[in-house]
C-alpha cells in the first residue's frame, strides 16, 4: 500500500513538472523560439455516452412512461374537444379548454404526489428539445401547407410588414421597456441581451380566435388571409429574433464596438437567418415539385406519401445542421410545396396528406397546451408581481403599436381597407401560445433565478391572454357588432371558435387539381387581371413546376377514388351494423 502511494506521488510530481515546463515554454521570451514547435492535432468531437445494462433499462422504462403519459393526456384532450363540438360549445376556444384541463390534471397529480401514492414528476415535465424537434415542426409545416386556400402571394407585402416589422416593433417595445425599468430599479434588473430575448419570445402571437371569428363573420377574404399569414410568419420571425439575441449577442465582444455597430451586426445576423432559411426552404419545396413531376409515383400512393413526408422534414434538419432557422425553413417549404408539389400528387395522396398533417398538428398543439397547464405545478417558480404587471402592460402596448400604426399605413396602399373595429379585434385577440412557453424554457439564462422568473412570467402572460383575452373575445364581438349579431340570430348563425370543426371538411374546393393542359391555358387566358408575381407564376412558374393532367391521368384518378369509395362502402354494408335500408340512405343523401 505504501509503495502504491509513493508511485502515485511520483507520477503526480512528474505531471506537475511537465505543466511547469509547458507554462515556462509558453511564457518564455521570443529569443527562445528557435526550437521547433509542433502543432497539436485537432481534438476529435467527443462521442456521446451510450447507456448500457441496468441504466439503459431504467432509461427505456422512464421514456416508456413519458410516452404513455403524453398519449394519455392527448387522448383525454381529444375527448374534451369532441364533447365541445358535440354539445355545440362554440363560444369556448379549444386552447382555453385544453389549458384548463391541463391545470386540473396538474392539480390532481400534485395531490397524488402529496399523498405519496405515485410520483409522476419526470413524466409531466415539458422538455423543450422535444418541442423543437418533434412537436413544433408539424405545426409550422401544416400552417404553411394550408396557405393554398387563400391568396397568400398577392398579399405578401402586407403580410411581411405585419410579421417582420410588427414583430420587431413589439420585441423592441417589450425588451426596451423591461431593460429601462430594470435600470430604474422599478422591476427586476436584466441585461440588454436578456431583455431583448424575452421581448422577442413573448412577441410570438397565435391569434387562432381572430381567424375563427373572421371566418364566422364572413369578413373580406383578403383581410382574413392577411391575419392568417401574419400569424404564421410571426411565429417563425419571433423564433429567429430570439435566436439572434441568444446567438449573436452572447458570442460577440461588445466591449470594443459602439451601440450602432452592434445594431448593424445584429440586423445582418437576423437577415442572414431569415432570408437564408427562407431560401433553403423554398429551394427544397421546388426540388420536391420537380422530383414528383418527373418521377411519376401516382400509381403507388404509399411511396408518394413517403416522399412527401421526407421532403417535409428534410429542410428542418438541414437548416439546423448549418446553423440556420429550421422553423423558418420548414414554413417556406410548406408554402411552396402546397403551391406546386401538391398538384403533382394523386387525389388519394392529396387527401391523405391534408388529413395527416391536420391530425398530427392538432395532436402536437393539444399536447403543448395541455403541458402548459401542467407546468403550473411541475416547475419551480419565481414570482414577482411588479415584473409580471409591467410585462403584461408592455406586451399589450407593443401589440397596439404594432397593429394600429401599420394598419393605418397599409390602408393608404390597399383597396380592401382595415377598419378600426378590425384593428381593435386584431389587437385584443393577439393570444400568446405554445412558442413563447417553449422558448422561455429553452433560454440558457444565468443565474437560475432569472430563468425561473422568465419562465414563470411567460406562463402567466400566456395563461392571461388565453384564458382572459381568448375567453373574452366572444363577448367583445357581441358588444362591438350588435347589428351583425342580430342578423346572425335571424339567420340562426353563430360564431364558431372551434378550430378542429373548422378544419373538419375532408376535401376543399381548390384542394384537388384536375385541370388539363388545355383547361389551364383557357383559365389563364380568362384571368387578364393578374399582375406582378401572380402573372409570372401563372405564366411560367406554375407550368414548369406542376404537371398538367392528361385525360388518361384524370380518368385513372377518378377510377382510383371511386374504387376506394366502393370498397369502403361494401365493407360498411357487410359489417354487423350495416343496413340495407335504401330509404335511410336516400334521406342522408
Image (cartoon, rainbow, N blue to C red):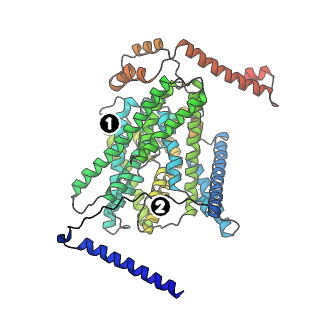
Q: Residue 494, image x and y in percent?
A: 57, 36
Residue that appears at 49% across and 31% down: 218
Q: Secondary structure at mark 1?
A: helix
> What residue do we see at 32% from left, 53% from top?
172
| Residue that sits furthest to the bottom in the current view | 2
Q: Residue at x 64, y 17 (%)?
A: 559
Label 2 sits on residue: 455
Category of crowding for the residue at label 1, using alpha-carbon neighbours closer than 10 angstroms: few (below 14), some (14–19), many (at least 20):
some
Secondary structure category for the residue under label 2? helix
> Camera-side residue: 309 or 201?
309
Q: Dividing the picture into quarters, in which one does residue 557 lie?
A: top right
User: Mark 1 or 2 closer to N-term?
Assistant: 1
Residue 398 position within the rendered picture, expressed as x and y whole percent measured from the top left: 36, 51
Q: Which residue is mark 1?
A: 410
Nearer to the camera, 461 or 446 = 446
Q: Which residue in the rendered view is the most extreme toward the right?
A: 576
Image position of 151 with respect to 439: above or below: above
Q: Locate residue 275, reporting x and y percent.
A: 34, 40
Vertically, is 547 above or below 144? above
Drawn side of residue 295 relative to residue 525, left or right: right
Image quadrant where one finds the N terminus: bottom right
Q: Is residue 247 left or right of residue 86?
A: left
Query: Is residue 347 among what the camera can see?
Result: yes
Amino acid at each position: 500500500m505504501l509503495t502504491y502511494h509513493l508511485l502515485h506521488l511520483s507520477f503526480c510530481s512528474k505531471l506537475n513538472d511537465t505543466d511547469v515546463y509547458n507554462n515556462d515554454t509558453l511564457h518564455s521570451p521570443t529569443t527562445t523560439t528557435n526550437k521547433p514547435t509542433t502543432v497539436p492535432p485537432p481534438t476529435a468531437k467527443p462521442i456521446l455516452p451510450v447507456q448500457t445494462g441496468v441504466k439503459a433499462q431504467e432509461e427505456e422504462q422512464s421514456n416508456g412512461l413519458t410516452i404513455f403519459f403524453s398519449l394519455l393526456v392527448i387522448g383525454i384532450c381529444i375527448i374534451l374537444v369532441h364533447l365541445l363540438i358535440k354539445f355545440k360549445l362554440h363560444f369556448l376556444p379549444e386552447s382555453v379548454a385544453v389549458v384548463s384541463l391541463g391545470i386540473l390534471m396538474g392539480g390532481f397529480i400534485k395531490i397524488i404526489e402529496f399523498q405519496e401514492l405515485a410520483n409522476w414528476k419526470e413524466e409531466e415535465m415539458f422538455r423543450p428539445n422535444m418541442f423543437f424537434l418533434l412537436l413544433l415542426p408539424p405545426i409550422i409545416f401544416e400552417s404553411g401547407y394550408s396557405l393554398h386556400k387563400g391568396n397568400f402571394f398577392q398579399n405578401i407585402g402586407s403580410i411581411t410588414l405585419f410579421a417582420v416589422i410588427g414583430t420587431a416593433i413589439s420585441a423592441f417595445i417589450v425588451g426596451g421597456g423591461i431593460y429601462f425599468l430594470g435600470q430604474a430599479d422599478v422591476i427586476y434588473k436584466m441585461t440588454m441581451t436578456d431583455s431583448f430575448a424575452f421581448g422577442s419570445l413573448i412577441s410570438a402571437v397565435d391569434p387562432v380566435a381572430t381567424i375563427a371569428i373572421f371566418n364566422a363573420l364572413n369578413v373580406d377574404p383578403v383581410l382574413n388571409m392577411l391575419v392568417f399569414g401574419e400569424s404564421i410568419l410571426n411565429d417563425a420571425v419571433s423564433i429567429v429574433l430570439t435566436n439572434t439575441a441568444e446567438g449573436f449577442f452572447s458570442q460577440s465582444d461588445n466591449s470594443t464596438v459602439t451601440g450602432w455597430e452592434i445594431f448593424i451586426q445584429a440586423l445582418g445576423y437576423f437577415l442572414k437567418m431569415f432570408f437564408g432559411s427562407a431560401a433553403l426552404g423554398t429551394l427544397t419545396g421546388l426540388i420536391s415539385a420537380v422530383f414528383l413531376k418527373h418521377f411519376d409515383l401516382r400509381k403507388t400512393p404509399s411511396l408518394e406519401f413517403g416522399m412527401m413526408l421526407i421532403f417535409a422534414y428534410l429542410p428542418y434538419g438541414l437548416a439546423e445542421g448549418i446553423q440556420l432557422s429550421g422553423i423558418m425553413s420548414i414554413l417556406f417549404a410548406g408554402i411552396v410545396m402546397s403551391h406546386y408539389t401538391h398538384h403533382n400528387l394523386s387525389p388519394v395522396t392529396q387527401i391523405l396528406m391534408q388529413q395527416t398533417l391536420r391530425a398530427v398538428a392538432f395532436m402536437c398543439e393539444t399536447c403543448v397546451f395541455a403541458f402548459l397547464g401542467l407546468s403550473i405545478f411541475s416547475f419551480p417558480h419565481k414570482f414577482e408581481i411588479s415584473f409580471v404587471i409591467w410585462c403584461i402592460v408592455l406586451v399589450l402596448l407593443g401589440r397596439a403599436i404594432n397593429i394600429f400604426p401599420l394598419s393605418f399605413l397599409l390602408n393608404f396602399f390597399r383597396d380592401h381597407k382595415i377598419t378600426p373595429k378590425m384593428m381593435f379585434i386584431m389587437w385584443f385577440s393577439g393570444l400568446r401560445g405554445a412558442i413563447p412557453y417553449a422558448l422561455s424554457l429553452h433560454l440558457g439564462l444565468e443565474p437560475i433565478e432569472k430563468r425561473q422568473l422568465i419562465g414563470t412570467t411567460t406562463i402567466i402572460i400566456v395563461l392571461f391572454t388565453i384564458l382572459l383575452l381568448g375567453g373574452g373575445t366572444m363577448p367583445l364581438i357581441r358588444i362591438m357588432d350588435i347589428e351583425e349579431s342580430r342578423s346572425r340570430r335571424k339567420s340562426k348563425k353563430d360564431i364558431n371558435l372551434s378550430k378542429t370543426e373548422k378544419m373538419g371538411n375532408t376535401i376543399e374546393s381548390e384542394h384537388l387539381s384536375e385541370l388539363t393542359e388545355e383547361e389551364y391555358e383557357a383559365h389563364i387566358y380568362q384571368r387578364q387581371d393578374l399582375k406582378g408575381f401572380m402573372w409570372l407564376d401563372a405564366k411560367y412558374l406554375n407550368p414548369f413546376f406542376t404537371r398538367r393532367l392528361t385525360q388518361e391521368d384524370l380518368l385513372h384518378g377518378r377510377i382510383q377514388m371511386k374504387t376506394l369509395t366502393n370498397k369502403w362502402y361494401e365493407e360498411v354494408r357487410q359489417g354487423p351494423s350495416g343496413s340495407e335500408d335504401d330509404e335511410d340512405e336516400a334521406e342522408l343523401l
